[in-house]
Amino acid sequence: MAQLSVEHLSKTYPNGVTALHPCDFAIERGEFVVLVGPSGCGKSTLLRMIAGLEDISSGQMRIEDRVVNHVEPAERDIAMVFQNYALYPHMTVYRNMAYGIRNRRVPAAEIDRKVRDAAQMLNLTEYLDRRPAQLSGGQRQRVAMGRAIVRDPALFLFDEPLSNLDAKLRNQMRIEIRALQQRLGVTSVYVTHDQIEAMTMADRIFVMNAGRIEQIGTPAEIYHRPASTFVASFMGAPPMNLLRGHGTGTGAVMLSGGLQLDLPMPTDAGRDLVLGLRPEDMRLSPDGPIRFDIQIVEELGATRLLHGQLSEQPFTVAVSKETQAGPGIARLAFAPDTASLFCGQKGHRL
Amino acid sequence: MKRARFHHRLLPVLLLVPQLTIIVIFFYWPAWNAVQSSFFLQDPFGFGSQFVGLDNYSRLFRSAEYMKVARFTLIFTLLVTGFSLGLALLLAVKADKVIRGARTYRTLLMWVYAVAPPVAGLIGVALFDQNIGAMTRLFSGLGHDFRLGVNYLDTAAAMVIVSVWIQTPVNFIFFLSGLQSIPQGVKEAALIDNPSGLRRFWEVTFPLLAPTAFFLLIINITYALFDTFGIIDTLVKNNPASNPMTLVYKVFIDGFRGNDIGGSSAQSVVLMVLVLILTVVQFRLLERRIHYT
Ligand SMILES: Nc1ncnc2c1ncn2[C@@H]1O[C@H](COP(=O)(O)OP(=O)(O)OP(=O)(O)O)[C@@H](O)[C@H]1O
Ligand SMILES: [Mg+2]
């Protein structure tokens, strides 16, 4: 049974902005789902609708088997971790963590045990008597996590919980959150605009763009079989190369610079196409079929990025640090099954 | 806080002079005068005075009438402070729910602040006019013959109502901005953590409003004790004798109508001490408990 499912769910704000176009999905028990997309695409809106902090304009939402469209946030059996932590400034760490269950007729001894367990799990035991103002950003983040854990809810909701932390702490917390979630087995919905967080943490990723869910899939599916040119260019660093061209009708693409590439799939003659090639799927080979004009070499340590022109279009290739390359003409080859083909007009995968 | 640096030693002193002059002329000097004359018995016709030590004070505390005024002042202050704070808080909470960041509403509500207190006072007094006052008519509709300036309780009620009427909008504005400055996220976290709206208010919203409420409490007590002078004067002008009055008004009546400068000065000194104690107690006891950072 799905933990959370929605049908034709949509959101239009009173000012007329449609932040979420109708969508359907279901999230299974124990799953870690990441909503990812550029700023303003509606991630927070969707998460806040799940939390009950925003009204649902149309459609239906269920948590377990219960329709929750008109259920108050406190009655939905969810816990949320906010971007700026939203701790109660007048309460100690202990009271912050206990507050959610104190309001739910839990016996005092059990509250105490749960709070202390969570504090131990998050290394917060020595800070229990402090106020949020006396904690560092990372510690506050943990308290916010602790507050959610103590609640023991059906759903964890996270809205960019790591975006206020520095890079090192972010990496560490990312791993900790994922480990905690796996240990507790609580279904989680996690919003981020950081594609690395999305790729590393998610069981499934929902890629959103302009109020629509463009693709739902595992990190591998999203990466290797992007559903649209948007997903292809948003996920992956460096992003997938997108080359414009048109079909030849013979299972090949004629790139707009005049280069023809054979593909294992049929291509309608004359149809506008976009060919997607991951930078790391390309390899340098002296007798490869593709001419690549390297202009800039970018050293990243473990890998080396070669930026240049392919058939008069910008193109990037990633090679390992052992591969020597410098500006000039090189030849490329790729395995045809790693290529993605998209509609030139609408951008969807073919 | 930023520290300004002056190149000249004299400049900061020079800048402080106007303010200090005002304080000395209008506060320290009269206060010192009051302390001095509280130890003298003045001739009612202004021909010299005689040192009487603490006589004026002992006379004061033995006076049944003074005690009656003190009691009234206490009750009056409690009622005015309680009602104007309570009412303002209630209105602010309701307004906060409606406006949720909508700027236009907030600006409209701010206008209340722009009505000058004397104007509001005059309107309030007009409400209790014996012939055309809306409140008078309301009471007569309820079967009560409201006699301002004649009936002690009626007059007391009018004083409280007009005082509350004037102070509530000020409190309202402060409470509203206090409510609006509570982070949205904290309110939402409470919404998820606590199903009871009433308990959310008392456990999360109100504690976060406490600095504002504490500030207003001091402002309101001071207001009820001292700034209501004008209202009381307007309401009981014709016949102060049998009507309720506050300690401050009694200072004025005894000193300027009764020409008892010594007694009146002693009363002023008592009030000064009262304010001093009040301020110290409030800051010491309360302020420590309501700051979070
Ligand atoms: N209360 C609101 N009233 C009207 N429009 C809103 C409101 N909240 C958000 N929007 C609009 O809805 C759209 C989606 O906003 P949302 O906050 O969900 O974006 P987001 O994906 O979370 O972005 P970010 O990554 O910047 O947080 C935006 O165009 C935004 O301007
Ligand atoms: Mg957001």
Image: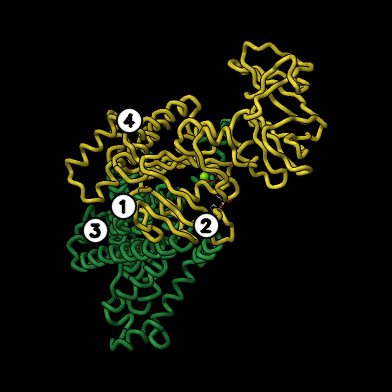
Chain colours: A yellow, B green
Chain at numbered mark 3: B
Q: Are the residues under marks 1 and 2 on the same chain?
A: no
Residue type of the residue flagged with mark 1: Asn
Q: Nearer the viewer, mark 4 or mark 2?
A: 2
The residue under label 3 is: B56
User: Horizontal and vertical percent for residue A284?
Assistant: 69, 17
Residue type at tag 4: Leu
B116 on left or right of A186: right
Q: Looking at the picture, does residue B72 appear above or below residue A110?
A: below
Is the CB of the residue bearing disc 4 within 8 angstroms of ligand 2? Answer: no
Spatial CA distance of label 1 from label 4 is 24 Å
Q: Is mark 1 within 8 Å of ligand 1?
A: no
User: What amino acid is found at the position of numbered circle 3 in the picture?
Assistant: Asn
| Tag shown at residue A11 | 2
Q: Relative to B211, is B66 above or below?
A: below
Task: Determine whether, in the image, residue B159 is placed left or right of residue A284.
Answer: left
Q: Could you say whether the residue bearing mark 2 is in a helix, strand or loop?
A: strand
Kind of residue sitting beneath label 2:
Lys
On whether disc 4 and disc 2 are found on a single subunit, the reply is yes
User: Residues under labels 4 and 2: Cα distance?
Assistant: 36 Å
